[in-house]
Amino acid sequence: MEFSALLAQLLNGLAEASSLFLVAAGLSLIFGVTRIVNFAHGSFYMLGLYVAYSTVEYLVGRLGPAGFWVGLVVAPVAVGAFGALVEIVLLRRIYKAPELFQLLGTFALVLVINDATLYLWGPEELLGRRAPGLAGSISLLGRQFPTYNLFLMVIGPLVLGLVWLLLARTRWGVLVRAATEDRQMLGALGVNQAWLFTAVFALGALLAGLGGAVQLPREPANLALDLRSIGDAFVVVVVGGMGSLPGAYLAALLIAEIKALCVGIGSVHVLGLDFSLSKLTLVVEFLVMAVVLVVRPWGLLGKPQAGSRNSAPAEAPLRPAGNGLRWVALVVFVALAALPLLQTWLPYASVLAQDVLVSVLFAVSLHFIMGPGGLHSFGHAAYFGLGAYGAGILLKVLTLPMPLAFTFAPLVAGLGALLFGWFCVRLSGVYLAMLTLAFSQIVWSVVFQWEAVTGGSNGLTGVWPAAWLGDTAYYYLTLVLVAASVLLVRRIVFSPFGYALRAARDSALRADAIGIDVMRVRWAAFVVAGLFAGLAGALFVFSKGGVSPDVMAVGKSVDGLVMVLLGGIQQLVGPLLGASVFSVLQDSIMRATDYWRAVFGGVILLLVLVFPHGIAGFFQGLGNAWARLAARKPALLPREKRA
Amino acid sequence: MAFRACFKVAPLLLALLGAPSAWAEDVIKIGEVNSYKSQPVFTDGYKKGMQLAIDQINAQGGVAGKKLELLTRDDNANPGDAIRQVEDLINREHVDVLAGAFYANIGTALADYAKQKKRFVLVTEALSDNIVWSAGNRYTYRLDASTYMLTAALVDEAVRLHKKRWALVYPNYEFGTAAASAFKTLLKARQPDVEFVTEQAPPFGKVDAGSLVQALVDAKPDALFNALFGADLAKFVREGTTRELFGEQLPVLSIITGQPEYLEPLKDEIPPNWTVTGYPWYSIDTPAHKAFVAAYQAKYGKENLRFGSIIGYAAVQSIAAGIEAAGGKTDSESLANAFAGLNLTTPDGPLQFRASDHQATWGLYVGKLAVQDGAGVMVDTQYKPGLGLLPSDDEVRKLRPAE
């Protein structure tokens, strides 16, 4: 590669860095102050581009070329206003929920906004017009360089400077920084947090909208932008250090430059092997993130997260199941066992139940690490996928008999968890979550491209159960294994190991002081969760006859998170309820309407508002209230219970 | 009280879990699974095309005396859900014929399901060569032209150009890698001195167009083969034009770019000297196709057709022809037999499902891109019948696993 080509690629990287930074900046700001993991940030970006398209088309007709630039200002402001609305109408109601629960609300928003965009703008991609005055290119380093890229290169640092001034030099900025440090103290000092949060959220949305709007001359507005940009934004924010804007810019620069170099260099010849760096761009940002987080656990310029004095009340200790719950569980189990017998009347029930059971096991395994473990994982699908692919590869490539392939598959996932867990448990909070995501993306990209073994993007097929495990037998195998796993996980939670794990979650310091090796306990829990997720993956692959990389993509991990949060993270039945409700709802809504995403999102929003502690949390609350009520009327109770 | 509540909930639960719907004896049900939500541009036209064909066939008395009925399901863009929807269609809806799949991984999964359950499936769109070759089986047939056929359609033009230095750009998944490798093999066979100077495989949907175009400029190719489409293509075209990569000096061969789904978003930003495969519905001059367009626009208004429109229409035509050939029988064995060597006529012309590899000889339009009335169109189009784009029967038999 010539030196001038290298320089030119670095210039390209600068323009890309600005684009990345603009989306990431808002996310960082919002997280820093409100501690909300805002999944809908990518949707704001997408809206920014769509609104900019429409306003520019409208204004250019009336104002001429100036309309373009006016449109580029109007669109982010509109998105900012929409962000404020979202904060007031939705998020304000769920700040008091357990940590991460807000993620559920923003996930639902993603679905709703995507379908609303489809309804308003239609399915076609919309390529905006070129920027008047910056439409062409100039000759630079003997190459044609788009003039609009020069504008982009400036706007990133400019926004960085302006936001920095806002935060460092204004009273509002002082309040925002104070809120980032300790928002309860700020509240105690009499600052109206509600409006501060609204303002910060609106500013973040505005920045996302701006990020989208400035892409107008470079890429068409399309419905895939929300999920695409949210991934990038998270990576940049975390690599830079949550809440650090200069860090975000640095991270954006690092990632954009590395990508540009990968594309520029193309293929390299190492040790007699041709290696395509161009194909590496599939995963390079996640590689960067993994390396940065392993070396610097709080990102490049981040600081250790202050232990947030969480707004939600401390988690109540878990209690073993009462008799009532045991009876319900038994009835549910018997009902599920009876489903295949009802084939004539309910032909679809056992088909759906098969998938629901697999989802339940996946959610239970994720809940084990998130609830009792307190380790949030955004990449749990990796272990589900490793189980599924493990089974498939053992069966097809190593030609093991099906029962053996099935048995060893969870161990493959367990091994993955053993390796990645060692790195992950050293981190905490969102950084841990993002490292799990990075690892899952790395595994995904390997599976996606290793055509000879994994079947590449099309995946493996022909992974069917042995003949004696035909339709109904396989359903019963699933039912028995899932039920046994649920009981086993419960047993683990109430074992000494489970108590140690919960002690480590509630206070790592105190747990350490009484002789619990916190790291090792967490690591072991990570592996246990991986094993059960792997079992779910193995059950999945043989029920479908194959597997493709989507089972370990981000979407699958997010589905798992949503199931756990929906059910209630603080109760052991939470993931069972959450996974069942999620799967059955999605399945029935999907066939009921074309706009199923919006309806599904709407229903989740409703559930979020009605059950701010998850479904199981709601019922437990109800149960507790009933118990209190009953205690107040002792006459109604038998005499011996009163004592 | 709780007991009584059960009675109220039970019907609801039954509806959710899906009580069987009654089915009539004089109806043939087609169950169709596709990525409706994930690929709205294609599937919108596709659904309309299917419905148009169903209406026309039913108006003429149906197939073998029975009316056709269409049931569509969204597969949520993943094979796991697709299989569940298929089982629902079979178990609850008792469909007679299965069809569908847009994504290659879903098409491959359906093909494997067909093999395992001995259930006839017509894969309508998914392009992967595997579906009819390495994963091919008795029960799976495919309608749309495969990746190999798309690439083969452009090789004549590549040979005619006689350029030495070629660059390749394709999305980094099976469609792109298969197209690139087919192109390299086919061109090398006919022009041994060809040199492939650079290969760029950006992630699908995430092309970094600036760096990509510059890398291509720096490689100084004489010609370019492209398999990017959708948003990736629009970014690539705009950046390539700005950076003066495209022009008369660089001929570009590009698959599926001429399909309205991907051409329309580009509006008038059509670079010169691109030869593409696609679907120029506006300029196809045969009476059969004109009648199809007229009927389509009479039903749905004066809107533009999609490539999905003709595929959906031809899919239903194929199924109807297959059932007719099976003497009205719709069991999988009869259909699998009837489709082998099945001939029918679509608005594009005659078509056959080859007995050797179950691939339909779907013909392709190849033409140059140009701008007319501010929109991109294909001009100087030539129709290439599908048979000429496929390897011979003997060659594909070697590619398919033994039955």
Image (tube, grey):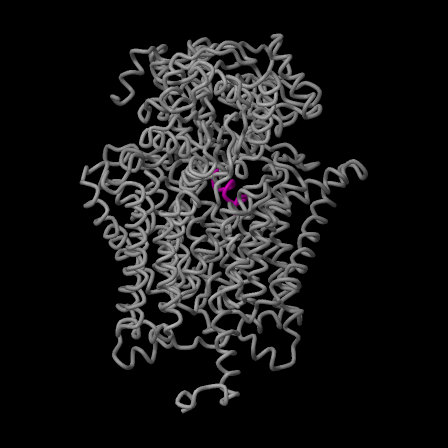
In the displayed structure image, the side of residue B402 where residue A222 appears, left or right: right
Q: Is residue B372 above or below residue B92?
A: above
Point 57% across, 55% down: residue: A603
User: In this figure, what is the number of numbered marks?
Assistant: 0
Point 53% across, 33% down: residue: B71
Q: Position of residue A166 (x, y in %)?
A: 64, 64
Q: Is residue A426 visible?
A: yes
Q: Position of residue A358 (x, y in %)?
A: 36, 51
A523 or B88, which lies in front?
Answer: B88
> Within the image, what quadrant is residue B134 found in?
top left
Q: Which residues are magenta?
A: A7-17
Q: Position of residue B110 (x, y in %)?
A: 39, 32
A342 or B147, which lies in front?
Answer: A342
Magenta region, main secondary structure = helix
B400 or A349, which lies in front?
Answer: A349
Point 57% across, 62% down: residue: A30
Q: Which quarter shows the C terminus of chain B?
A: top left
Outermost residue on the right side: it is A62
Q: Is residue A232 visible?
A: no
A402 or A523, which lies in front?
Answer: A402
Q: Is residue A540 above or below residue A632?
A: above
The answer to if A14 sits in the magenta stretch is: yes
In the displayed structure image, the side of residue B401 where residue A438 appears, left or right: right
In the displayed structure image, the side of residue A518 where residue A560 appears, left or right: right
The answer to if A235 sits in the magenta stretch is: no
Q: Position of residue B133 (x, y in %)?
A: 33, 22
Q: Is residue A513 above or below residue B260?
A: below
